Image (cartoon, grey):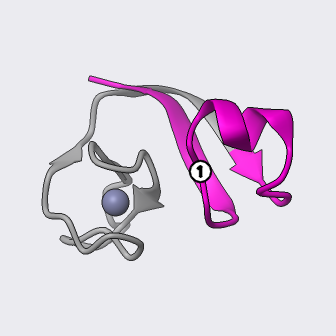
Amino acid sequence: MAKRLQVCRNCKRFTTERVCPSCKSTNLSTSWKGVVVITDVESETAKMLNIIEPGRYALYVG
Ligand SMILES: [Zn+2]
């Protein structure tokens, strides 16, 4: 059985676990839009989204 993909409302990181792997928050949402993959945290996109760690993030979390 596939795990449900959720997004952390705190840092917008994707996770299939019950807690966010990045900030350990349990404030997760299944309502999200858009995917952005950050490989370079110095990029404009990463700075705009306040991302400090490479990974997959949602653009919008409901
Ligand atoms: Zn998080």
Residue density around tag 1, few if under 14, some if 14–19, many if 20 or more, within 10 Å: some
Residue positioned 77% across, 57% down in the render: 41
Which corner quadrant holds the N terminus?
A: bottom left
Instruction: Say which residue appears at 59% left-offset and 50% top-offset.
Output: 51
Determine the image quadrant of residue 25. bottom left
In this image, 47 relative to 7: left or right? right
Measuring from the top left, give residue 3's x and y in whole percent.
33, 66
Q: Position of residue 40 (x, y in %)?
A: 85, 58
Q: How many numbered discs?
A: 1
Q: Is residue 53 left or right of residue 7?
A: right
Question: What's the residue type where badge 1 is placed?
Answer: Ile
In the rendered image, the vertical position of residue 22 relative to residue 6, given as above or below: below
At 39% across and 28% down in the image, what residue appears? Answer: 32
Residue 43 lies left or right of residue 15; in this view the side is right
**Magenta residues, start to end:** 37-62
The one nearer the camera, 12 or 47, is: 47
Nearer to me, 5 or 41 = 41
Q: Is residue 28 magenta?
A: no
View extreme (left): residue = 26
Q: Nearer the viewer, residue 23 or 33?
A: 23
- Quarter holding the C terminus is top left
21 relative position to 45: left or right: left
What residue appears at the point 27 percent right and 39 percent down from the top-left corner?
30
Residue 52 place in picture, x, y as percent: 61, 60
59 is higher (above) or lower (below) than 51: above
Residue under pointer 1: 51
Q: Position of residue 13 (x, y in %)?
A: 46, 54
Specify the quadrant of the image occupied by residue 12.
top left
| Dot 1: element | loop
